[in-house]
Image (cartoon, rainbow, N blue to C red):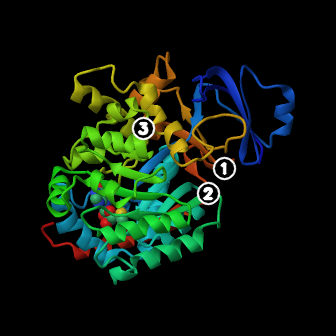
């Protein structure tokens, strides 16, 4: 469907950071055909099947959530106020063992996708078990996603024999590699402390064989650094470097505890980094040296992490936290300006995944969002970047378009059966509640 959006504040995030007020966007099929200032020429009104008047609204590229475990939305609020090791070992791994299967991942990802779309996310990168369920949920929602099958060296949901984890991931890649232009299947090795060197090398080779992305949680906590040093004689990132698995298609998540040499390794190997400030704050894991990474031209993108450690998937909130935490930590208010943080959720991830999204320009896929700016907390309006990072809430998003298709209009998700999703989520949550001890 061809769509014309006009009379809005248009934030393009192009190379020159152009924004128009007023301006218009014309979408033809699944791509952006024209972005310009002023009012559109008359013929665009007659060409468009759908016309959206965006007065007092801001139009921008959809946000990209670069790290989550979508299905963990079903574990939201189940284990709070704990350090990572206790959180994983005492609560998360056991509950995953008891409950995660393809059906769980399907409903959990539907719930997460619903939350993400409502708060302006049009693409996300996921790592979890039984990812077939995640693919099916994303196809049902119409959301763009990089979906990575999890690999870990102990019995995991649907892969009870860890010797079969690589084979299982390969079946996943084979099944989904060219099924939809919205889905990129990928590989997620859990961490250096849960995967052997052999598993890590095989997992990376598998990703390479299928020319896809290899994700891994790295250097998240001080404990991990000490543990890997004790076992392998290197700090985590250096250890991965010696395994030969760091390159441009490797995406490291967290990267909180890095030495100066490791920052140089990241730069020299072309590795990309995902920063998850809210999860890192909540688990008290540490803080990635993002300003230093960006100074070295390393691509850094923003992620929420899963709902059991965040506990939401609102990237507007994540941007706000990201901009402030680095200022507070460095005692420098000029660090991490709003525009840079916004690019960590749009332009940089698009580059990271070589996707033609993240910028409103001719030829890019039409993934965009419309935000209602006629609200007390957004008056007055001087600077779009300031509002988008420091004032907008995820709940302000009105309309979401992905791949040229209207997915949400006036805050209503089209094409999903929300009562059916709610019933299934309640049923699963009730089973989880029964499983937890009474004094949990
Ligand atoms: C193969 S990835 C899925 C696996 O990762 C677990 N997980 C979720 N968040 C974190 C985190 O911040 N650090 C380490 N592991 C994490 C999740 O529960 C799954 O078991
Ligand atoms: Zn994670």
Q: Secondary structure at mark 1?
A: loop
Mark closer to the observer (1, 3)? 3
Q: Badge 1, how many Cα within 10 Å: few under 14, some, many 20+?
A: many
Q: Which mark is residue 202?
A: none
Instruction: Relative to 110, say whether 120 is above or below.
Output: above
For label 1, being within 8 Å of ligand 2 is answered no
Is residue 63 at all visible to an observer of this figure? Answer: yes
Pointers 3 and 2 in contact (C-beta within 8 Å): no
- Residue located at (67% from left, 34% from top): 361
Q: Which residue is mark 2?
A: 182
Pointers 1 and 2 in contact (C-beta within 8 Å): yes
Q: Earlier in the sequence, mark 1 or mark 2?
A: 2
Residue 127 image position (x, y, % from top left): 41, 61
Q: Which residue is mark 3?
A: 298
Q: In the rendered image, which quarter is residue 273 located in? A: top left
In-image side of 396 versus 196 (left or right): right
Q: Which residue is mark 1?
A: 403
- Residue located at (56% from left, 61% from top): 211
In-image side of 357 versus 216 (left or right): right
Q: Secondary structure at mark 3?
A: loop
Mark closer to the observer (3, 2)? 3
Residue 393 image position (x, y, % from top left): 42, 36
Q: Earlier in the sequence, mark 3 or mark 2?
A: 2
- For the residues labelled 1 and 3, the Cα–Cα distance comes to 28 Å
- For the residues labelled 1 and 2, the Cα–Cα distance comes to 8 Å
Q: Badge 3, how many Cα within 10 Å: few under 14, some, many 20+?
A: many
Instruction: Relative to 130, say whether 7 is above or below.
Output: above
Q: Secondary structure at mark 2?
A: loop
- Residue located at (40% from left, 40% from top): 267
């Amino acid at each position: 469907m061809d769509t014309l959006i006009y009379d809005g504040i248009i934030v393009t995030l192009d190379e020159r950071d152009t924004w128009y007020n007023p301006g218009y966007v014309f979408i033809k099929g699944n791509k952006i055909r024209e972005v310009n200032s002023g009012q559109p020429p008359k013929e665009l009104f007659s060409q468009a099947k759908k016309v959206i008047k965006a007065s007092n609204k801001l139009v921008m590229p959809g946000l990209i959530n670069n790290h989550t475990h979508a299905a963990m939305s079903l574990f939201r609020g189940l284990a709070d106020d704990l350090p990572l090791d206790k959180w994983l070992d005492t609560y998360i791994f056991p509950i995953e063992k008891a409950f995660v299967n393809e059906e769980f991942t399907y409903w959990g990802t539907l719930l997460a996708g619903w939350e993400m779309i409502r708060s302006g996310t049009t693409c996300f990168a996921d790592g979890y078990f039984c990812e077939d369920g995640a693919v099916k949920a994303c196809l049902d929602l119409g959301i763009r996603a990089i979906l990575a099958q999890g690999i870990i060296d102990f019995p995991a949901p649907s892969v009870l024999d860890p010797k079969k984890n690589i084979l299982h991931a390969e079946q996943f890649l084979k099944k989904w590699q060219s099924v939809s232009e919205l889905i990129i299947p990928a590989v997620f090795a859990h961490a250096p402390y849960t995967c052997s060197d052999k598993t890590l090398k095989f997992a990376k080779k598998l990703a390479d064989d299928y020319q896809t992305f290899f994700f891994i949680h790295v250097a998240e906590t001080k404990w991990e650094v000490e543990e890997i040093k004790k076992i392998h004689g290197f700090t985590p990132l250096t250890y991965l470097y010696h395994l030969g698995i760091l390159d441009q298609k490797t995406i490291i998540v967290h990267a909180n505890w890095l030495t100066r040499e490791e920052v140089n390794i990241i730069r020299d190997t072309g590795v990309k980094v995902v920063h998850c400030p809210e999860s890192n704050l909540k688990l008290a894991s540490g803080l990635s040296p993002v300003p230093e990474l960006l100074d070295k031209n390393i691509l850094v993108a923003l992620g929420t992490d899963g709902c059991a450690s965040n506990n939401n998937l609102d990237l507007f909130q994540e941007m706000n936290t990201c901009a402030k935490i680095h200022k507070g930590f460095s005692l420098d208010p000029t660090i991490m300006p709003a525009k840079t943080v916004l690019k960590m959720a749009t332009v940089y991830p698009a580059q990271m995944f070589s996707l033609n999204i993240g910028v409103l320009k001719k030829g890019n896929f039409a993934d965009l969002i419309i935000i209602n700016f006629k609200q007390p907390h957004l008056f007055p309006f001087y600077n779009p970047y300031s509002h988008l990072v420091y004032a907008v809430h995820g709940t302000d998003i009105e309309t979401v378009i992905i791949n040229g298709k209207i997915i949400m209009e006036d805050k209503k998700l089209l094409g999903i059966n929300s009562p059916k999703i709610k019933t299934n989520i309640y049923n699963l949550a009730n089973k989880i509640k029964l499983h937890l001890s009474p004094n949990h």
